[in-house]
Amino acid sequence: MKVSCPALLPGNLIPPVYAYRGVAGGRNISLPVVWTDVPGGTKGFCFSIIDRHPIAGNWVHWFVVNIPETASALPEGASGSRKDMPPGAMELQNSYGSQGYGGPKPPRGSGPHEYVMTVYALDLPGLSLVPSATSTEAEKLMKAHLLGSASIVGIFEQ
């Protein structure tokens, strides 16, 4: 399985437009992601963006579940859009406390943060979760159904 983010700049830098509001240039537009070479038997996908920096403490920026097997991408700006999100996909609550995408906003001076974008291929079409479910709940349910995953890292600092 392979994953890519066409918006990343050289060095895998995340452009400021994808950052959370309050960051210089931040418009909180969700990043685009594309995946290929999925494992046989895949019936659905999940996707996450998590800041693994020690200061961030695994901050969840975006967690999407119940992405149909026919999907191979989440387009730029898809978060919160019925038109652009794959049918049936559900955005869970992020660490900001809202549903959907919340872009990078690392503390000033904390150095570069790595935002791990991961696509998970599952052997079932969806997880029985409510939108207020946590990423921990989703990850627990995914474990028994994971066929494969792929990640890419985007870098952002302010």
Image (spheres, grey):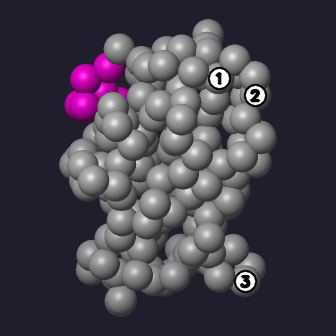
Viewer-nearest of discs 1 and 3: 1
In the displayed structure, 12 sits above or below 63; it is below
Indicate the quadrant where residue 131 lies. top left
Direction bottom: furthest residue: 24
Viewer-nearest of discs 2 and 3: 2
Q: Residue 127: x and y, percent?
A: 42, 18
Please tell me which residue is depicted at 56% across the width and 57% down the height of the picture. Answer: 33
Indicate the quadrant where residue 154 lies. bottom right
How many labels, in total? 3
Q: Is mark 2 on a helix, strand or loop?
A: loop
Along the polypeptide, which appears first: circle 2 or circle 3?
3
Q: Residue 156: x and y, percent?
A: 56, 75
Dot 1 corresponds to which residue?
42
Dot 3 corresponds to which residue?
10
**Amino acid carrying mark 2 in the image:** Pro
Q: Does residue 148 appear to the left or right of 145 in the view shown? A: right
Q: What element carries label 1?
A: loop
In the displayed structure, 72 sits above or below 107; it is above
Residue 43 in the magenta stretch? The answer is: no
Please tell me which residue is depicted at 47% across the width and 31% down the height of the picture. Answer: 68
- Specify the label residue 69 is tagged with: none
Please tell me which residue is depicted at 42% across the width and 28% down the height of the picture. Answer: 66
- Specify the label residue 39 is tagged with: 2
The N terminus, quarter of image: top right
Q: How busy is the neighbourhood of tag 3: few (under 14 within 10 Å), some, or many (20 plus)?
A: few
Q: Residue 53: x and y, percent?
A: 59, 57
Residue bounds of the magenta highlight: 129-134
